[in-house]
Image (cartoon, rainbow, N blue to C red):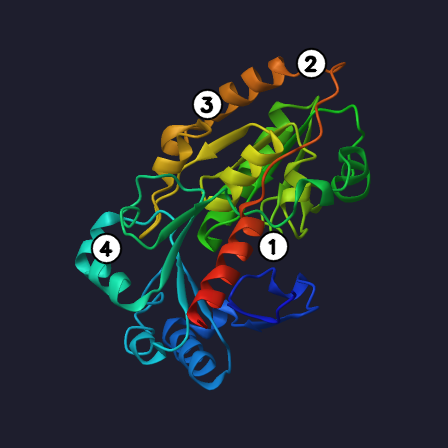
Amino acid sequence: MQRKVRIITNSPYAQQIDHENCLVHWIPKTAGFSQTCLQVREIITETDYDRLIIDTFPRGLGGELADILPELHLIPRILIHRDINPSYITAKQLRSFVMANFDSVIVPGEGQDLPFCDLPCVQHTAPWLIRNSKELTDKITVRSRILKVEPSVKTILICAGGNISELSFFGQLALQLHENFPECAVRILAATCPEACPEALWLSHHPGIECLAAADIVIGGAGYNTVYECGAVGVPLVALAFPRLYDRQQKRADKSYWVQDLNLLDIYATVRTLLDQIQPDKKPPLPSYVNGAVQAVQKIEQIYQHSQK
């Protein structure tokens, strides 16, 4: 059974989402912290819904949900438990808060060693991906139409997600890789083109997993989407663990080719090693993976049905 879904997000890619059966409440990043918290409160308190799903932050990004969740005891409340800094959990006493205010906790492929994994209401899925493997456009088509790259040319894709403050670094990295690896096609995937980067190297495309699957090597931060999407499509990720207030990118970077301290020489050396391992005559297998998002939909539906008994 299909359900109507409402999403609250401040993602710059929100305007590219297909809105069929999905209403997006987009909060621009220009709204500021306090205004964002206020809008989240207004949407949650003034909207009709039969279950509430909170991603990562049990109290909301700014604590805006702390006094709202206890009032929603008749509505199933589900926490999506991605990795989060244990010191933040201790400081905000989140363990007791989660136990008191959430009916279920779903871990989207982040492992068994997260802070809330021992709670009795925890369920695990594979990593969540925005596309099933059968929905991906073939590699040659994506290279031709989106990346503007010849199929036989080795392709390095820089995934410039994360904070706006890091965009300049990624732009300069794209330009330097373009100069140091002239035999390769270098592209940078970002919501906006970095100032130091030629527009010919830049592309903005949603969902990014389609571009990652068409690359030979990806360079990017060790955020959730980048790490697990590269792992799913079988493309090596040169991971750069950026400091975050809550997310432990260093922990997740261990799943990839982690270049510590953002050392450019180490990035070049890692890229060169991976390029040398590519066998040009060997056709890579088509991606095949389990999408945890599909598993999660089934679990969320079961939670709702159980709450109605």
In the structure shown, which secondary structural element does the residue marked by tag 4 occupy?
helix
Residue with the mark numbered 2: 279
The Cα atoms of the two marked residues, 2 and 3, are separated by 24 Å
Task: Tell which tag, 3 or 1, sits nearer the viewer.
Answer: 1
Mark 3 or 1, nearer chain start:
1
In the structure shown, which secondary structural element does the residue marked by tag 3 occupy?
helix
- For the N terminus, the image quarter is bottom right
Residue with the mark numbered 4: 89
Residue with the mark numbered 3: 265
The answer to whether the residues at label 3 and label 4 have Cβ atoms under 8 Å apart is no
108 vs 7, left or right, is: left
In the structure shown, which secondary structural element does the residue marked by tag 2 occupy?
loop
Is the residue marked by circle 2 packed among few (<14), some (14-19), or many (20+) residues within 10 Å? Answer: few
Mark 2 or 3, nearer chain start:
3
Amino acid type, callout 4: Ile
Amino acid type, callout 2: Gln
238 vs 289, left or right, is: left
